[in-house]
Image: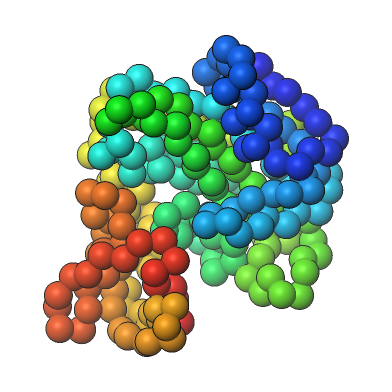
Amino acid sequence: MKIIKFNTINSTNSFLKELASSSDVNNFTVVVTKEQTAGRGQMNTTWVSEGGKNLIASVLIRCSGLLIFNQKYLNYAISMGVYEALKKYNLPKLMVKWPNDILSETDKIGGILIENSLQGNKIQASIVGIGLNINQQIFPEDIYNASSVKLKTGIVLDLDEILEVVLKYIKININLLEDEMFEVLEEKYLSVLYKKNIPSMFKTPQNDFFMGKIVGVSPSGKLLIELSDETIQEFGLKEVSFA
């Protein structure tokens, strides 16, 4: 496994994507940086991180023959890899918020961005961006629910160590994916899914509010919410949020 380290870079995902498109890059090549100037989150959002305090990394993953239809299991594998790595550090009430935010109690500890390259009906390769708040203690005022391992546990972690642990558990779960252990991955993911089967208030981007409860994830990877009339609706990314 090759690890490429930077002090500062615009985006680890962008760098690794360009590198993979222009050269023969080995599976599980990792790009890690102390600071990135143009970090990206889901749906063109930004990822803000204090330099030198957190884990900012991207990993190239090739899953042989994974159908696009089964891409939700890739998300499960990555999410559970990061979750199981952080579980080693005794964070309170660690959960995965759909699709792949990592929460401790109700605070966001980390985020994952998966960008797939497709070939026909299969996923040829994936660039997996991982941002974990490790030692940062002060966050911008407009990020109201951010926290870190340090704030939650009082422990200062070595960033190289946490990277090694994260990669170890991602590999374990990617092996399950390669072996098509889809039911195992789904069971693991749903067992730690934030607010699953708990009646909650949701809102749409149009500020429509409704009660419902998360009951699972659809075959295409959308969130399944059971409404008060017991019907189940599917919601894509940014189509619904907790009120």
Where's residue 18, x and y in %?
63, 28
Where's residue 20, x and y in %?
58, 22
User: On the rendered structure, is 134 left or right of 98?
Assistant: right
Residue 194 in which image quadrant? bottom left
In the rendered image, the residue lying farthest to the left is 230
**Along the line of sight, which residue is nearer the eye, 240 or 1?**
240
User: On the rendered structure, is 184 left or right of 172?
Assistant: left
Where's residue 95, x and y in %?
47, 57
User: On the rendered structure, is 186 left or right of 55?
Assistant: left
Residue under the point 73% across and 23% down: 4
Q: Is residue 208 visible?
A: yes
**Along the line of sight, which residue is nearer the eye, 243 or 103?**
243
**Along the line of sight, which residue is nearer the eye, 228 or 84?**
228
Q: Is residue 163 visible?
A: no
Image quarter in which the N terminus is found: top right
Residue under the point 59% across and 66% down: 107
User: On the rendered structure, is 215 left or right of 141?
Assistant: left
Where's residue 22, x and y in %?
61, 19
Colour mapping = rainbow
Residue under the point 67% across and 55% down: 47
Image quarter in which the C terminus is found: bottom left
**Along the line of sight, which residue is nearer the eye, 124 or 227?**
124
> How many marks on residues?
0
Note whether 72 is above or below 60 in the view shown. Answer: below
